[in-house]
Image: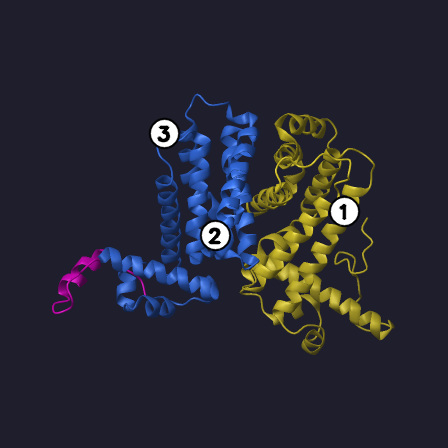
Amino acid sequence: MIDHSEDLRQWRLPRGRHGLPRELVERSQRERLLAAVIKVTVAKGYESTTVGDILGEAGVGRETFYELFDDKLACTLAAHKILVDDLEEQVRAAYTSQDCPWPQRARQALAATLDWFSSDPVAARFTLIELSTVGPAFRATFQSEYARFTTLLEDGFGPEDPQPQLSGASGLAVGAMLARIYEEVVLDRTAALPRLLPDLTYEMLVPFIGEEAARAEQKRAVSSPSG
Amino acid sequence: MQKHRSSETAATVLQTGAPPPIDRQSQRRRILDAIIESCAAKTYAATTISDIVGRARISRTTFYKHFDDKRDCFDAALGYCIAELERAAAAAHSPTDPPGDAARKGAAAVLEVLAARPGLAQLLTGDALAVDPMVIERYRRVTIPALQALWGREGDSADTHTDPRLAFGQAQVLILNQIATGKTDRLPDLLPEIAYLTVSPFGGHDEAIRQSRLAENVENSVSER
């Protein structure tokens, strides 16, 4: 499925003695720590998570942790970045893969976004909900990720595509996705996210192309949910 | 540390020689301002009761006369913020304004208040999320009926337009981003987008675009001054 060098869902390192080269062991320890911080943070909340909890979950020693990360926050933000990098990669692939009209590509990007969050509710909760509890670093991270996805959306506009009817439409579209997915995750309805595709397609497209054209794309989303 | 409502009056009566129980309202207001400022300065999680009573220049006892605990106080502060914004929005338009104009003026007033009082903006978009992820619901519950009332019941069927509940989530994201970018004082720059979001669910996309352009023009004429 996903072949990412740091995919947290792929790590498998047997405990105990093994003959792996040191570099590989270290990378895998890093991955175990990152997977652990996600799991523990979602279970206990960021505030009450300790470095000890992360070590226990990962089966990694304290010294190794501090060789790899400055503190709990650094480990949390590193895990966050890997997840969001992966999300961006998936969305970009869906958005740019086919040569079809922009509203359809936008709908495919939205479908990929919903699939990404629904396929891993723990990752969804970690990236969306826990981030707001890390303190001042939250704002900087939020800002850069918002800009990243707004730019991604705007990069997909070809010169032949009509201008968005509202000049700030990209920000509204990212806001629509974020706000809606956030609420569903808070309400523990993460697994059912893909069902929102038709309605959210409409909401996202209206500021770009108006109600009538957005309604047409919404109907297409109902008949071919995968894009 | 528990507040006992039943004993509160008795305690007040027994405080002979203490300053008269002046202005309970303004005391309460000082506490709310204090928690808002403290959350803006150091986040809700790091704010202690000592921070609040220090900023409000009141005693711990007084604090617990008004609130059960920090969370109770925070909830009251949120209610106060929302009421402030509602007041500003309502005062910004006259009964003769067409609904789209009234909604745009209301949105402009809300952004002005948030820009002038960054603590309110931070409470509603940043910190409050960590305390109560569904804080937006409180704002929606007040604002959506007020906007619906502007358009009256004979307006377009609502389901042809965008979702008003989502519009508030989108507005929250835009405002949070503006704060995160360090441009809280320039929140009014968001008016073209916020006016669009405010009008679109009730008056439709075309009217929302019209109001958004009016907002752009207002802004340009302001910045040219």
Say whether residue B5 is magenta: yes
Give the numbered dot on residue B86.
Answer: none
Q: Residue at x 61, y 28 (%)?
A: A211
Find the distance from the CA under tag 3 to the CA under tag 2: 38 Å
What amino acid is labelled 1 in the image? Answer: Arg
Up/down of B225 relative to B103, above or below: below
Q: Position of residue B47 (x, y in %)?
A: 43, 66
Range of the magenta residues?
B1-23
Give the left or right position of residue A164, taking residue B77 as reference: right
Q: Quadrant of the N terminus of chain B?
A: bottom left
Q: Which residue is mark 1?
A: A92
Q: Colour of chain B?
A: blue
Q: Which residue is mark 3?
A: B96
What amino acid is labelled 2 in the image? Answer: Asp
What amino acid is labelled 3 in the image? Answer: Thr
**Contact (CB < 8 A) between labels 3 and 2?**
no
Q: Position of residue B148 (x, y in %)?
A: 43, 31
Circle 3 chain: B
Q: Which residue is mark 2?
A: B132
SS of the residue under disc 3? loop
